[in-house]
Image: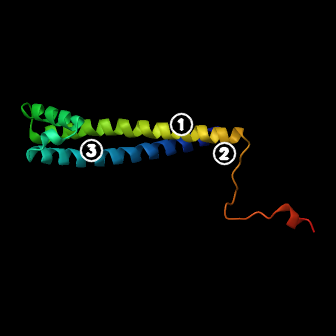
Amino acid sequence: MNVGDFARTNNRTTMASSSSIAKKARTKAETDFATWLMMAKLGSFDDLPLNAQKFLTDYRARLEMMSEAESTVLAVREVYSAYYSEMAAWARHRNRKLANQRRRAKSCGFRGRRNPGQLRRPRALWAG
């Protein structure tokens, strides 16, 4: 494997994780917005988190200028953007933390077992 192959492989891994984050953020944004909208219609607007209240207030303000469908699409897109940013930042933090742990383990000379299921015999048993 040369350097170019490694870069392509690494890029695919990054794309896969970012698409996974995007899918999770999209699903969460759609379900949360629908839940918030239903709670607001039932009279529980004040019980919602502040960020949900802001998204719904912006949604209602846009209803005066555009259709309900267009306003909903924009609101879900805004929630998605916020969720994606939050999830991606968490993933970057986690990846940095794991990389630091690996770096520290290498500097200590620790190398994990290649086959954790295989038991090692004590040296005394090897000597005949």
Instruction: Give me the residue at 36% from left, 44% from top.
Output: 22
How far across and how far down the image is residue 103, in percent? 64, 38
Side (left or right) of 33 relative to 122: left
User: What is the three-letter code of the residue carrying label 3?
Assistant: Ala
Which residue of the protein is positioned furthest toward the bottom in this rendering? Answer: 128
Q: Which residue is mark 1?
A: 96
CA gap, disc 3 and disc 1: 26 Å
Q: Is disc 3 placed on a helix, strand or loop?
A: helix
How far across and how far down the image is residue 42, in percent? 8, 48
* Quadrant of the frame with the C terminus: bottom right
CA gap, disc 1 and disc 2: 25 Å
Q: Which residue is mark 3?
A: 29
Side (left or right) of 115 relative to 59: right
Instruction: Give the class, few, some or many, for how many residues have Cα within 10 Å of label 2's Cα (few <14, many ≥20).
Output: few
Q: Which residue is mark 2?
A: 1
Q: Earlier in the sequence, mark 1 or mark 2?
A: 2
